[in-house]
Image: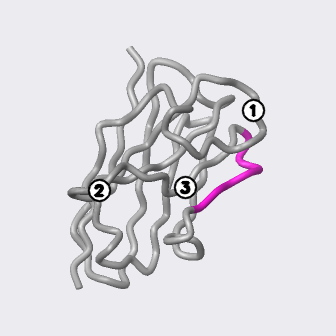
Amino acid sequence: QVQLVESGGGLVQAGDSLKLSCVASGRTFSRSGMGWFRQAPGKEREVVAAISWSGDSTYYANSVKGRFTISRDNAKNTLYLQMDSLKPEDTAVYYCAASTRQYFSGIYYSAVNYDYWGQGTQVTVSS
């Protein structure tokens, strides 16, 4: 059974940092693109950051550019999201996602390109 399990969420104050992790099990995603999405109450799910299978290419939403960093450790089948200078508007449930397409050097921006999803981890930033 394939699983993506996120961790690292929590309640923090504006300006603080958090690091999210997503551990995959059941299959390897070391040759597939992965991404982080978030969904705030009453809003649609949106892409936060995405990374190619090799880690050579990354994408960030404008709202997080310069504050968040996506990375991966293919040997550990793990995806990370370092979040610095957090703002109240970053409050959301954060999901990791993985594609099953292999060796695509580009970036998947849309949720439709992802085949597996984690259960989400809550990030709450107080002002």
Image vertical order of residue 77 relative to residue 16, above or below: above
Question: Label 3 crowding class (10 Å Cα cut-off): few <14, some 14-19, many 20+?
Answer: many
Q: Which amino acid type corresponds to the residue marked 1 in the rendered image?
A: Phe
Q: Which residues are magenta?
A: 54-60
What residue occupies the far top of the structure in this picture? Answer: 1
Check residue 55 for magenta coloring: yes
Location of mark 2 (residue)? 43
Residue appearing at x 64%, y 56% in the figure: 59
SS at badge 2: loop
Label 1 element class: loop
Q: Front-most of 62 and 93?
A: 62
Q: Is residue 94 above or below residue 52?
A: below
| Front residue of 85 and 101 | 101
Label 3 SS: strand
Q: Residue at x 27, y 58 (%)?
A: 40
Q: Which mark is residue 49?
A: 3
Q: Can residue 23 be found in the magenta stretch?
A: no
- Which quadrant of the figure has residue 117? top left
- Horizontal and vertical percent for residue 18? 38, 67
Gap in Å between the C-alphas at discs 3 and 2?
17 Å
Please name the residue shown 74% across and 41% down the image: 54
Q: What is the number of callouts on the image?
A: 3
Q: Residue at x 68, y 54 (%)?
A: 58
Q: Is the Cβ of the residue at disc 3 closer than 8 Å to that at disc 1? A: no
Q: Which label's residue is closer to the chain start, 3 or 1? A: 3
* Mark 1 vs mark 2, CA separation in Å: 30 Å
Q: Which of the two marks, 1 or 2, is nearer to us in this view?
A: 2
Please tell me which residue lies in front, 41 or 87.
41
- Quadrant into which the N terminus falls: top left
Dot placed on the residue nearer the N-terminal end, 1 or 2? 2
Mark 3 or 2: in front is: 2
